[in-house]
Image (spheres, grey):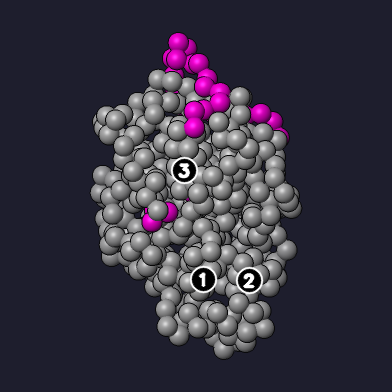
Amino acid sequence: MPSRQTVLKTLTDALREPSKDNCQMVHRSLPATEAERVNVGRLSESDFRLVVEAALTAPSGDNCQPFLFENTAEGVVIHHDGDRAAHLLNADALGSYITLGCTLESAAIAASGLGYHLNYALLGSITGADRGLTPVARFTLVPGAKADPLALHLSERHTDRRPFQGGHLDAPLFRRIAAMASAFPGVGVRIIPPKDDDLAASICWLDRLIWEHREGHRDLMRWLRLSQTQIQATNDGMPWPTLGIRGLELVAMRLMRHWGAQRIANALGATRMMERLCRQLMRSSAGLVLITISEPSRVSEVDAGRLALRIWVALNAERYGVQPMSIAPLMTYLAAQNRIPNLAPAYLERIKGLAAQFTTSFGLASDERPFWMLRTGLSTPLPPNRRCKRRSWTDATLGNPV
């Protein structure tokens, strides 16, 4: 177990490094004795900064970073920015709740390095149609925590869209990952090798959605940074090097920012080419990691994000690359609850059949629903310019931080 001083120094150094890469009242917390349950309300500036910088490392859809943080006497309030989060694929704010779970878990891991447990509460509810700022959660810190071993690796978490070099699902790492779900009631994890060609075909076919749906295309394009000027002017979105494109591919991508050009490219086979690339990436992986939910609720959706974040950090710490494969499981989950966005019949038919494919391929129990999926495999270190940028802690806070 690393010492608190080691963890704190590692966290501070890594998070400050510029090139590094985040209803009813519901409470969640890590264990603490009654004597230790003295909530810290308003944080000191140094503690607030460290925790917010850690929270900002959490993944979000297209790296939109949809949260702002406010240091108050009642604790840190997380505000959801509906304008940043607006996206076809963020139906019913599902993506925002996943990101909230990842954000809270990142903050909790960092807080452990300061000697704190993190208690949080969900505040009200948000939908995919919300705009502007909405308070979505509040957390307080409780003294008495031991440093989480993942704190040493939190800043290493990143998305890797490159082909992987396989890997071994019988390694102890994957047994540890399978055991992580026990800390999150109603949430599970299943891991299989990417050998089911029919499942891969359906997953990769659905990935074409973002390029073939006008609204989805619009939402994606506002977060692509396809020039050095855009990259230097922003600390969010996806810089083109992170997509693994270059040369003529970059030129084509710039042209396809326009919907008319995208439609022509699709007619000429662009999305079929992307589908083939997706299948190649899946075949290069060691495994597919599926997060499941047995009792759908906002609490379970947040907890699924928390579990996924821990799995992701653990994989990156062992030199396994990670890339989310989000569309197929999220659409399957939404369809089971009649929360699916307005899509063409061909997509709806494929989504209906996916539930059975996920159940068969992953051996799901009757009450397990596919929720979110990661592909993973052995990988080489990711060059700094292929990691997404993050907003500064001052840009992501409301009011006076102290």
Question: Between disc 2 and disc 1, whose residue precedes?
Answer: 2
Residue assigned mark 1 = 229
> What is the quadrant of the N terminus in the image?
top left
Residue assigned mark 2 = 217
Q: Nearer the viewer, residue 278 or 29?
A: 29
- Span colored in magenta: 19-45
User: Which numbered circle lies on residue 53?
Assistant: 3
Question: Between disc 3 and disc 2, whose residue precedes?
Answer: 3
Give me the residue at 61% from left, 63% from top.
Answer: 351
Question: Between disc 3 and disc 1, whose residue precedes?
Answer: 3
Query: Can residue 63 be seen from the camera position used here?
Result: yes
Residue 32, quarter of the rendered image: top left
Pinpoint residue 362: horizontal percent, then vertical percent: 44, 53
Pinpoint residue 324: horizontal percent, then vertical percent: 47, 58
Which callout, 3 or 1, points to the residue nearer the camera? 1
Give me the residue at 37% from left, 31% from top.
Answer: 113
Residue 261, quarter of the rendered image: bottom right
Q: Nearer the viewer, residue 258 or 163?
A: 258
Proximity of marks 3 and 1: CB atoms separated by less than 8 Å: no
Q: CA distance from mark 3 to mark 2?
A: 30 Å
Proximity of marks 3 and 2: CB atoms separated by less than 8 Å: no
Give me the residue at 53% from left, 58% from top.
Answer: 236
Q: Magenta span has 36?
A: yes
Pinpoint residue 353: horizontal percent, then vertical percent: 59, 63
Q: Amino acid at mark 1?
A: Thr
